[in-house]
Amino acid sequence: MRIPGPAGFSSTRFLFPPGRIRRALLALLMLAPHHAAADEVKVWAAGAYSFSDELGGFQITGASGIGTKDDPFVITEELNSSTPVTLTIRTTKPIQAFGKAGEFANGMMYMRIEVLNNSGQAWVEFQFELQEILNRPSVFGDGLSFDQRNKTPDNILSSNFADFDRDFEPYDRLLFRNGKVDPLKTARFEFLMTDYTPRWTFYLVQDPRIPTG
């Protein structure tokens, strides 16, 4: 049977039979919304930055704030294992060191990270590490750190851990210790990240620790 169409238009001009084309188009339409939805939940925007779980191993469930002391970035996450995961952070607005928070990526980021332990194991320590280049330690001269210039910080806190240690060479690391996060419980971590030479993209590695004995 002839396929109806505009006068003078021949169905034989299709490279593939029309039935196959219709099936292919239907398949694309069915798949496209799912891919779009999957991409949307990977990136969360807040202030002048975006936060992504694109490197896998965990899920971001929320992001808010502009990164000031009074309105910190609040990132809620769920970790399904006790292995390190990496949060990808990107600027979404112009970079201006010490510019107005929310309008510029200014390199001053007060953070509150709330992590649900869905690993099935208790965590006895929790470490954060900053990296300007993925899988490469952040060095002293790159300007990125856990508020390295402040020798006596009063803004590093945790709901579950009593103490912390900071290391700046050869890594920028912040270790919370003397505490525990049981399975299906949530821990809160607060700290300041500073980047005096702001970059478009950098990374925050999160490493929950389990008992070794």
Image: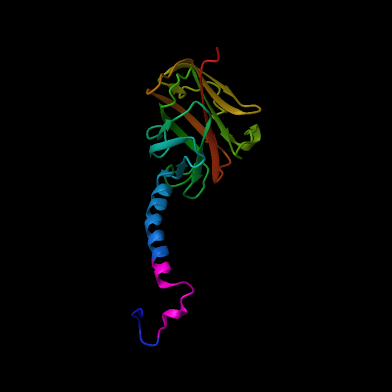
Looking at this view, name the residue that lies furthest to the bottom. 8
Query: Relative to 170, does residue 104 appear above or below in the rendering?
Result: below
Instruction: Indicate how the structure is coloured in the image.
Output: rainbow
Q: What stretch is highlighted in magenta?
A: 9-22
Residue 145 seen in this snapshot? no
Q: Where is residue 66 in the image (x, y as percent from the top left)?
A: 40, 40
View extreme (left): residue: 4
Quadrant where the C terminus lies?
Answer: top right
How many discs mark residues in the rendered view?
A: 0
Farthest-out residue, front: 1
- Quadrant in which residue 41 is drawn: top left
Please state which of residues 202 and 97 is positioned toward the viewer in this rendering: 202
| Residue 120 covered by magenta stretch | no
Query: Which residue is located at x 37 percent, y 62 percent?
Result: 26
Residue positioned 49% across, 74% down in the render: 15
Left or right: where 89 falls relative to 29: right
Q: In which quarter of the image is the N terminus?
A: bottom left
Residue 175 image point, x, y percent:
53, 22
Nearest the viewer among 71 and 182 is 182
Q: Which residue is drawn at 37% across and 54% down?
A: 33
Q: In this view, does 35 lie to the left or right of 199?
A: left
What is the x, y in percent for residue 211? Answer: 52, 15
- Residue 116 seen from this side: yes
Q: x%, y% of residue 156?
A: 47, 23
Question: Vertical placement of 142 versus 26: above or below?
Answer: above
